[in-house]
Amino acid sequence: MTKEKRKRLIYSLVTYLLVIAAFIFLQSMIANKTISRSLKGQLVPICCWIVMAVSLNLVVGISGELSLGHAGFMSVGAYTGAVVSGWLLNGFDVQDTTLRLVLAIVAGGLFSGIVGALIGIPVLRLRGDYLAIVTLAFGEIIRSLVNVFYVGTADGKLHFSFLQKNMPDAVTMLVDGAKGAVKVKPISTFTAGFILVLITLVVVLNLINSRAGRAIKACRDNRIAAESMGVNVTKYKMMAFVTAAVLAGMAGALYGLNSSTVVPSQFTFNQSINVLVFVVLGGLGNVLGSIISAAFLTILPEMLRAFADYRMLVYAVVLILVMIFTNNPTIRSWVNRLTAPLRKKEKTGGDAQ
Amino acid sequence: MTAFLRFLINGVSLGSVYAIIALGYTMVYGIAKMLNFAHGDVIMVGAYIAFCGLQYWGFPPVAAILAAMVVCTVLGVTIEGLAYRPLRQAPSLAVLITAIGMSYLLQNVALMIWGANPKSFPQTFINSSTWNIGEMSISSATVITILANIVIMIGLTLFTAKTKMGKAMRCVSEDRGAAELMGINVNRTISATFAIGSALAAIAGVLLCSSYPILQPTTGSMPGIKAFTAAVFGGIGSIPGAMIGGVLLGVIEILGKAYISTEVGDAIVFAVLIVVLLVKPSGLLGKPVREKV
């Protein structure tokens, strides 16, 4: 086992262990009833945002393409999940909430993946800033279409329409245009969220450390060099993009089924930026970092009520400062000089082992 | 027919606003090779300054516009100097994220200063009269917007073609390294580009709010994104392209909203962007970029 390989293995293990430890800790807190009400309400959303952040990290950090429409996939997942869950309940009288939740999450992921593939085929031919702006455009298109989208169920059949008047009379509305998905039965559980986070970690960490993952990183670092080595750039970029879309869709389904309504305004451009902030602060390409920053930044505004008003302001400043500090050559060499003695010690310590 | 003509003129007017905003995007993209995401929010700041000038400080209209232009110019140059200049050599992803951060910063500062409640922009000075042509009535704001667009376009074309600074801009956009070797001060040229773009953004803000008088901290973001779409549509980096793209986009949006659906008007605009990028990635008037190994 090479040193590099061992390092990656340890990193993955630490990530899994931390997540599992956090879950056990929180579960015991729930059992002892020592958990605060607001934190308990935040548990499922935290899981969703972790999945969102890790999956966006796959696109932005690993594949090196800026996607500004990640919340769009989340909304696709949330709506699909709400529709599937409502359809199963109204049409087939499925009372088992676990079964409904699992089917809804799978359907959300599948549908979001299909949408991701449809978007990815044209979009991934573009590069850099264009790709960013087109993903943004897709996010906005999804949002405005969802605003005029109606889904109802009658006699176990689903009815779709972009016009309310096309709906048959004896229909139970599941998605009601700008009002969003209505009368959703909240069935998401923390355990489901935890399992989803674990699935995400297994998928993403294995993908990153596989042959395909190395190909994806090669495309990011130097597209032309990767292409001349025989790496199919579009295929691998597509792989990262669609995987992220599937995961975001699953997170969306879980998120949508956590409350009684899903409205289009939950999944705006701001939400995409929010997730991007998680990813950037956690470190581009760093999965554990994304998990920690997503969890921390979701709890933080709840803990500091006074801070909530300034949250976006602080985010903005932090985003700019992080970018300047990590990318400006002058500042970077200055920071390197400051931390040089520290790193030297570490290195000799490591060799002595 | 009258209705169609009215929609068409409204579309050209809205498109003219997009075109003026798109100029800022296209010049900055052409010269600094970066997508200035915060440009839309500079528009919002300009509109707020003009609003304050008219409403609170009792400025005459022309002075209010000038004040907005001055503030926006200073703001644009400051943003460039503080946030973008340190990242001149950085990968474009880092610059783009910084620009997004800047956009959020401006929106939230505006939120703190002016509050979240929408302000209604005074309608007194540009939108003062309407003319009737046959059965159709055209407001003066519409006419002034279209005229302003034409004047700005001619002025900018002359500026880039004839003046020394304009030549420097074209040089930097063609090859930054070579321009630097020829003794052109690249940093100053980029600052000047930001100054011009931001001053135009102030004008666009006033024109936008004269036709659509609701002013809030997020006023600039959607027109900003659409104007960027217009710049890409016309071919980013090209000044006439920004004008054609902007006007076409405005017409498409208004006609789409009038004849298809109000709700999906924005979706139509973005769908157009995607189709254009797929069919002709360099835009209508853009030059195809050749890739070098």
Image (spheres, rainbow, N blue to C red):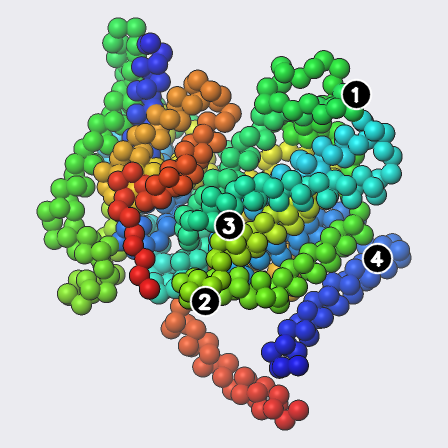
- Say which chain tag 3 marks: A
Q: Could you tell which of marks 4 and 1 lies nearer the N-terminus?
A: 4
Q: Could you tell which of marks 1 and 3 lies nearer the N-terminus?
A: 3
Between disc 1 and disc 2, the foreground one is 2
C-alpha span from label 4 to label 1: 40 Å
Asked whether the residues under the numbered discs 1 and 2 touch, taking CB atoms below 8 Å apart as contact, a structural biologist would say no
Tag 2: amino acid: Met
Q: Could you tell which of marks 1 and 2 lies nearer the N-terminus?
A: 1
Crowd around label 2: few <14 · some 14–19 · many ≥20 (10 Å)? few
Residue corresponding to mark 1: A155
Query: Residue A79: x, y in percent?
Result: 67, 35
Horizontal relation, residue A100 to residue B47: left or right = right
Residue corresponding to mark 2: A229
Query: Residue A229: x, y in percent?
Result: 45, 67
Query: Residue B73: x, y in percent?
Result: 28, 47
- Say which chain tag 1 marks: A
Q: Could you tell which of marks 3 and 2 lies nearer the N-terminus?
A: 3
